[in-house]
Amino acid sequence: MRGARTAVVLGAIGPALALNPLDTFYPPTLNDTSYISNTSIGTYGGIYKAPTNGPTEGTPYGTYDYCSMPHPRTNEYELPEPIAKGSVKGKLVYLEYLQRHQRRSPYNILPGGENQAYECDNVRTYLYAGPSSNNGIQPIPMYAQTYQDPTNPFTPGVNGTCQYPQITIGGVQDGFQHGKDLWAVYGKKLGLIPDAPNSRVWFRSSDSALTQGSAGAVLRGVWPKYDGALPLHQMVSSVDTVNEGYSCGAIDTTLAELEATSEWKAHLTVTADLRSKLGSMLGATSSSWQDTFDHFSDNFQARLCNGYDLPCSTSNSSACVTMEMAEEVFRAGDWEWNYYWRTNAYVKKYIQVVEGLFISEIVTRLQTVLDGNSSLDYSHTFIHDGDIGPILGALGINVLRWPAMASNIAFEIWETEGKKDLYARVLYSGQPIQTIHGSLEWLSLSSLIDILTPYVPEDITSLCG
Ligand SMILES: *[C@@H]1O[C@H](CO)[C@@H](O)[C@H](O)[C@H]1NC(C)=O
Ligand SMILES: *[C@@H]1O[C@H](CO)[C@@H](O)[C@H](O)[C@H]1NC(C)=O
Ligand SMILES: *[C@@H]1O[C@H](CO)[C@@H](O)[C@H](O)[C@H]1NC(C)=O
Ligand SMILES: *[C@@H]1O[C@H](CO)[C@@H](O)[C@H](O)[C@H]1NC(C)=O
Ligand SMILES: *[C@@H]1O[C@H](CO)[C@@H](O)[C@H](O)[C@H]1NC(C)=O
């Protein structure tokens, strides 16, 4: 956020390093495995803590915040530079908005069991079906109530009332605030989002309850008084172009190739001691916990982002994960995401096979705007970190930290007065994204299409093998 670019000294980094919020997105040494082992880096200014309740925001706003990434907000929002300076007059004509779901319970329960229960009685995850006609049966709004039955001999390894994963109350409240802020910028201020949903808005999610839960909360923030239902577009799960829906052998083989490199092995070597300690403390010695930092990171952030403590061993209550250990896990996770989507030798193919079809859909929508023939003004898609990461990679983000909860990409398309030229600005979590193509602050729409097009596979079937 340019408006909030006051440099702050972030305690964990030490007195020598003054970081502004934008800096926290782009650790300059993330490429190197010493980034993982260097404890003085801490979280590189990142925030990994939020209470159970309430929308949260990093301080100062705009800082990398795993629990709730910043998003466009009127306090900090600035018009694109040429318009703000008055050298060009123009208006926003299209918004392609992508976001990860809000904060949630973990996917991965510790194999040795969780020493704390997760409570989700404060959230209702609705699930009911009715006819499309308003005159037909109106179902009772049923919601899922997770419970434990003492006669069930199997244990999930965790007590409480949550499903894993599920959106948490903080996630719902955060989503509502996210939507209110989007309305204030793109509705009230810029006049693009209509007062009520119309045929020029379009919504999509993955087939996951998490993204669907976010959509209801965020869109209620956009339209607090709208009285009706809305379609949330979804593809058939088996062929979904987000969240790795369709099956493609080349996804696994490319992943295996990049994980066979010396760089990947070096990051496992520098973390051998940490992985071994966590493995024995938490019963997490299987390859799914040891081969990447995905599971530890997921498990720790879910606790920290929902008002809980880091876990302890269930057999020894004084053997606990320390914040220093968690920080090293988070640094290793950031290193892995940067490697997956930016620096590995197979990255172009990896992005193509994982996300190329969805990138193609975005390019197609941008192309219809360029052709002056778009049937939409505002498209909002609710997806996952595994979708946001490759799209940021395709944009050429300088450095990629793990795309955190509610991380978002806003493709803004502006039309100039007079010549009616179309320009793009791309915001990542509220700020112009810093890429190998420069800051995507103001570029012709056709240049943006040119940046993304190489990641659209020519023939996905043969690429997948
Ligand atoms: C560790 O990180 C700090 C802060 O970025 C830096 O000053 C220092 O040189 C690094 N140490 C090593 C050994 O890389
Ligand atoms: C879960 O609750 C049961 C019954 O209260 C208790 O015996 C068990 O120790 C708890 N497990 C954990 C991991 O807290
Ligand atoms: C429990 O954990 C603490 C802290 O790691 C350790 O000092 C102690 O020896 C452990 N106790 C047992 C019985 O393993
Ligand atoms: C990071 O790695 C990539 C790919 O190996 C390389 O092109 C780039 O120059 C590196 N960046 C830095 C800052 O070292
Ligand atoms: C514009 O879109 C309409 C319907 O979506 C289509 O029939 C028409 O051919 C398009 N025109 C151009 C110039 O692409």
Image (cartoon, grey):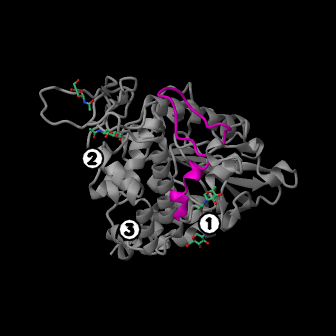
C-alpha separation, residue under disc 3 versus residue under disc 2: 26 Å
> Three-letter amino acid code at disc 1?
Ile
Magenta-colored span: 33-62
Label 1, label 3: how far apart the Cα atoms are? 27 Å
First in residue order: circle 3 vs circle 2 = 3
In terms of image quadrants, where is residue 366? bottom right
Q: Amino acid at mark 2?
A: Gly
Residue at screen point 38% across, 39% down: 320
> Where residue 144 sits: x, y (%)?
30, 29
Secondary structure of the residue carrying numbered label 2: loop
Q: Residue at x 37, y 31 (%)?
A: 133
The C terminus lies in which quarter of the figure?
Answer: bottom left
Q: Residues within 10 Å of mark 3 (few under 14, many from 20)?
A: some
Relative vertical location of residue 279 with respect to residue 322 in this rendering, above or below: below
Q: Earlier in the sequence, mark 1 or mark 3?
A: 3
Task: Return the residue at label 2.
Answer: 283
Secondary structure at badge 1 equals: helix
Disc 1 target residue: 449
Instruction: Give the distance between the C-alpha atoms of the residues marked 2 and 1, in whole angstroms.
Output: 47 Å
Residue under circle 3?
A: 255
Q: Quadrant of residue 275?
A: bottom left
